[in-house]
Each structure stands twice: as C-alpha cells, then as structure tokens.
Image (spheres, rainbow, N blue to C red):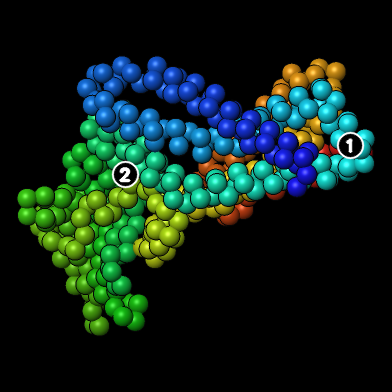
Amino acid sequence: MNIIDKYILKRYLSTFVVMLLLFIPIGIVIDVSEKVNKMLQNKVPFADIAMYYLDFVIYFANLLFPIFLFLSVIWFTSKLANNTEIIAILSSGISFMRFLRPYLIGATIVSIFSLLMGFFIVPKASEGFNNFRYMYLKGNGQNKMRQSTDVYRQIDDTTFVYVQNVNQNSQTAFTFVLEKFNRDNTLDSKITANRIKWNEKDSSYTMFNYTKRTVGEFGDVIESLPKKDAKYNFELEDLTPTVYVAETLSLGDLNKFIEKERARGSGNINTYLVVLYKKYSIPVSAFILTIIAVAVSAMKRRGGMGMNLAIGIGLAFAFVFFDKIFGVMAEKSSIPPLLAVWIPNIAFGILAIYLLRNARR
C-alpha cells in the first residue's frame, strides 16, 4: 500500500465517521422533539431514556449505514476531483481500477464491521429500542408488540393450534382450532371454539361454543358444549411471538429460532427470513455503493460538488426505497425472501458496473 492508497483510505474512513457523528445527533434531536411530550406524560425514568438513546444511536446508524457511506464517499471524492487530485493521480499512469483499490479496502473494513455489528451488537440494541417504544410510547405499558392475527403453532410432534385473532388486553383468542394427529399422520381429534380465554389464576382455558370431533374406526364422535374449561401445555403468549423478535436475536439464535418457527408453521416466517438475509446483504451493499459513488463523483462536473451530492442523494434514497419496498413484498407476498432482499443489490450492482465502465473511459 503506497502513500496515495493510505491517503484515500484515511479520507474514506474519516469522512464516513464524521458523517455518522454529524447526522446521528441530528437524528437524536429530531427524535427527542417528537417524543419528549410522551416521555414526560408517562414519567419515563431518565436512566431508561439514556439507555434508549444509546440503543437508538446503534439502531439508527445500522439502519441508515448505506446512505451515510454513500454520501461520505461522494463528498470526499468530489473534493478530490475539484482539487484536480484525481486527474493528477490518473495522469501519473495509475489506472482507474488501481485508483479504486483503496476504496475497496475501505469498503471491506466497513463491511466487516457492519457484519459483526449486525450479528452481535445491533440485535441487543434493537431489543432495547423496540421495548422502550412499546413500553412508553406506543404500548400503553405493554413492553412488547405481538403478532395478533392468523397464528399457527405446532405445540408438539402431533398437536397443532390455529387462532384467527388474539386480543392481548383481554387474554382472549378467536376462532380457535386444535388438531391432534396419530403417529401415522392421520387425524385423531379436532377441537374448535369461537372464543378461548386464558385464565391466569389456574393456568387453564375457557372455550366458548366448544366442539370436539374424535375420529373413530367405525364413526366419529362429536361433543358440543356452550362452554368448557381445559388445560393445555401452552400459554397464550406462546401463540403470539413478539413481532420484532427476529431483530433482537444474534445470528446463532436467529437461525435456531427460524428453524423452530418453520417447524411450527409460523405465518411470520418470511419476516424472520428477511431479517436474516439483510444481515448479509447490507454489508455487501457497501461495495456496490462505494463503486457507484466513485464513478459518479470522480470527474469534474459543471455543477461542481453540489451536482454530485444531488445525484448521490437521489441514488441513495432510491436504494433505500427499493430495499424497503422489496422487504415488505417478501413479507406480504409470494416473492422468495432471499430474492427480494438481494434485488436492490443486484439492480444497483448492474448500475455500478455500467457507471464504472463509463468512468474508466
């Protein structure tokens, strides 16, 4: 690594850090201005607020990491171009691809850091960030927001449960179905109820409009009652996982959780897979956005640095827009989560190759 490489790498990393240090306080100020009334109204302890903003910094930086990186590269590369430093470097016989090398080294450092953060640090920050929001700002004292519609669960090897809707406040689930199968996968019995209520006092359930169908060799046996109490080896909270639970798990725990939820037939499995795949796709985007930023800003333009920043901001927000849109589509439609998560990187990767080829000319 020669002097030019060290110079560019130092500018790459220092500008990125400065960009974070500039925008994160702005994000905190905006967040405080929006939530201060709610915090005062709920008499939130100062220690909880301080911890929330520590988690907020990590969560916010990870969420907007691609934009910060992209804008920082455009900023300092445009300054190099305006000072004719890039022209001098390329005129000395260094190819554009060789000029790009310190940028790629910087992208590698940032990507590794982002990957490790996403695996181990961001999940803990996400848990604190979301718990605070639902405890003091959204949940009226409930520290978690849970899945409440179309819940499927495998209780054990032979027992499956479905509820259409769950009301956490009244501890009641609606359209309850419990199916029990034999070892040969034939149906043994099926219980249905219009409504089922959890009784915390004795850990039992009260089922309303209860019907049980037991499959027999020579005919089925049907039992119907307006109300029936029973005990099962699951609690209502077991049926309703926290919506943001995947964001709060480290890599190993997340993989185990996804396998467990897949075995249970969870309707939220695509949401969890999107979280998993983004842990890998976001660091890769550092390389793609770095190449695009250099290709866009390495040449002098009539509008100067302002034009480069305008183009950069437009591309950065387009990337975030595509990332969010396809993430939601993966959760709500039949698009495979792996494909949906990687489409923005693939599309902008093609754009990066195109821009790089033109920049080299």
**Residue corresponding to mark 1:** 90
Q: Is residue 126 above or below residue 39?
A: below
Residue count near mark 1 (Cα–Cα under 10 Å), binned few <14, some 14–19, many ≥20: few
Q: Of residues 214 and 52, which is closer to you in this image?
A: 52
Q: Position of residue 96 (x, y in %)?
A: 86, 41
Residue 152: quarter of image: bottom left
**Residue corresponding to mark 2:** 146
Mark yes or no: residue 216 visible. yes
At a point 44% along the width and 23% down the height, the residue shown is 28
At a point 62% along the width and 53% down the height, the residue shown is 339
Q: Of residues 295 and 165, which is closer to you in this image?
A: 295
Task: Determine which of the numbered discs, if any, sits on residue 171 in the image.
Answer: none
Which numbered disc, 1 or 2, marks the residue that appears first in the sequence?
A: 1
Q: Position of residue 160 (x, y in %)?
A: 30, 64
Disc 2 element: loop
Residue count near mark 2 (Cα–Cα under 10 Å), binned few <14, some 14–19, many ≥20: some
Residue 289: quarter of image: top right
Q: Horizontal placement of 247 versus 74: left or right?
A: left
At a point 29% along the width and 60% down the height, the residue shown is 161
Q: Horizontal placement of 200 versus 54: left or right?
A: left
Residue type highlighted by circle 2: Arg
Disc 1 element: helix
Q: Position of residue 346 (x, y in %)?
A: 70, 48
Q: Is residue 316 above or below residue 118?
A: above
Residue type highlighted by circle 1: Leu
